[in-house]
């Protein structure tokens, strides 16, 4: 269950209203890299590791709940930045002498919209945050990445934290309000923290590369296709050993000839690698057995109960007749 405290995780403050920045900040409320996305992503991911990986479940739920706390901080900041943006203000503006000089209803609306920057704040949300990004695009469940494999999910989370961090960094440049900057710096810092936590969790899972159980074909895993021959660049992505499998990169400078001479890569023999087809099959069998043992061993298939604290057998409770 969720339990709500009236206090924010960080004491958000605002010097004065600023509807312009409130609109930009919506990006971190209902946008693709925002706090709601982060909260929902970790929350949804947590379900599948509840029994098999209780330590990761605990971490995912802790960080998900912290992200909901960030959502609350962003929402509260937007609310403060929109102080005065409500029906009353709109009426006041309608009555302003200025309005007499504006010709027609459309130009009046235009003036109000420009003044308030985001028309949705006054005509739709009544001066509060909306579950949209800064352009008014509604939040979508499509932002949430959860693939049921922790090595995949944790990498998605490292990427998500990187994006959330950089969006806060961009946002900080668009406000002069020192209080708001403090809040954004706190929120940005926490994404740096989460990045490391997800990375550390990933390292506790070994092996964690490649994601999943199936191994790559040793014929193709270390090929670099030089698809644009002019001004070639070399680096550890096409020279020396590969980062994870430690295979020697094979740089193919004439991809077209190479493909033709190998019967469309079918007849290619592995080079620069110690991995063999037999070794790969064995590893897949081994990994498959280990993973299914972890998952099956942890998940009962009948008489299931989510809570661990309550007695498993609830049939002996008093029946009131
Ligand atoms: Mn956050
Ligand atoms: Mn985060």
Image (tube, grey):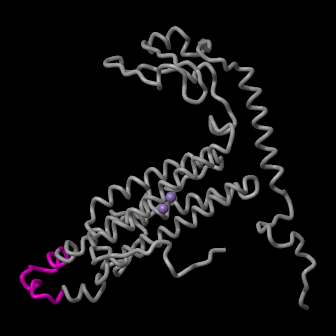
177 with respect to 213 (left or right): left
Looking at the rendering, in which quadrant would you find the C terminus? bottom right
Q: Residue at x 89, y 90 (%)?
A: 320
Q: Is residue 109 magenta?
A: yes
Compared to residue 293, the image places residue 183 above or below, namely below
Compared to residue 290, the image places residue 142 above or below, namely below
Number of numbered tags placed on the structure image:
0
Compared to residue 109, the image places residue 274 above or below, namely above
The image shows residue 39 at horizontal and vertical percentages of 54, 63
Q: Is residue 79 magenta?
A: no
Name of the residue lying farthest toward the right: 316
- Quadrant assignment, res 173: bottom left
Name of the residue lying farthest toward the top: 261
The image shows residue 24 at horizontal and vertical percentages of 32, 64
Q: Residue at x 33, y 60 (%)?
A: 171
297 with respect to 62 (left or right): right
**What is the span of residues highlighted in magenta in the rendered image?**
94-110
In this view, the residue in front, 193 or 26, is 193
The image shows residue 185 at horizontal and vertical percentages of 39, 62
Q: Main secondary structure of the magenta part?
A: helix
Q: Residue at x 44, y 56 (%)?
A: 33
In this view, the residue in front, 136 or 278, is 278
- Quadrant assignment, res 30: bottom left
Looking at the rendering, in which quadrant would you find the N terminus? bottom right
The image shows residue 217 at horizontal and vertical percentages of 63, 24
């Amino acid at each position: 269950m969720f339990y709500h405290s009236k206090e924010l995780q960080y004491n958000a403050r605002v010097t004065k209203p600023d509807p312009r920045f409130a609109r930009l900040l919506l990006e971190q409320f209902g946008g693709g890299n925002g706090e709601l996305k982060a909260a929902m992503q970790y929350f949804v991911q947590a379900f599948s590791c509840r029994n098999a990986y209780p330590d990761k479940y605990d971490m995912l739920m802790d960080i998900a709940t912290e992200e909901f706390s960030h959502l609350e901080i962003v929402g509260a900041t937007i609310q403060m930045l929109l102080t005065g943006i409500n029906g009353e203000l709109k009426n006041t503006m309608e009555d302003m002498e200025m309005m007499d000089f504006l010709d027609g209803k459309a130009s009046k609306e235009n003036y109000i919209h420009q003044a308030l920057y985001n028309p949705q704040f006054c005509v739709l949300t009544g001066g509060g945050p909306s579950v949209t990004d800064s352009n008014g695009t509604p939040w979508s469940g499509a932002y949430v990445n959860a693939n049921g494999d922790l090595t995949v999910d944790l990498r998605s989370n490292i990427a998500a934290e990187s994006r959330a961090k950089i969006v806060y960094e961009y946002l900080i440049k668009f406000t002069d309000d020192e209080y708001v900057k403090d809040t954004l710096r706190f929120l940005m810092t926490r994404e740096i923290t989460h990045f490391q936590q997800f990375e550390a969790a990933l390292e506790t899972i070994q092996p964690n590369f490649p994601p999943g159980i199936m191994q790559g074909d040793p014929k193709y895993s270390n090929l670099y296709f030089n698809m644009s021959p002019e001004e070639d660049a070399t680096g550890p992505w096409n020279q020396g050993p590969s980062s994870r499998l430690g295979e020697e990169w094979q740089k193919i400078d004439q991809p077209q000839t190479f493909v033709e001479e190998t019967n469309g890569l079918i007849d290619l023999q592995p080079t620069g690698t110690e991995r063999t087809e037999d070794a790969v099959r064995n590893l897949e069998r081994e990994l498959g057995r280990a993973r299914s043992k972890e998952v099956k061993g942890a998940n009962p298939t009948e008489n299931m109960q989510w809570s661990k604290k309550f007695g498993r057998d609830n049939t002996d409770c008093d029946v009131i007749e």
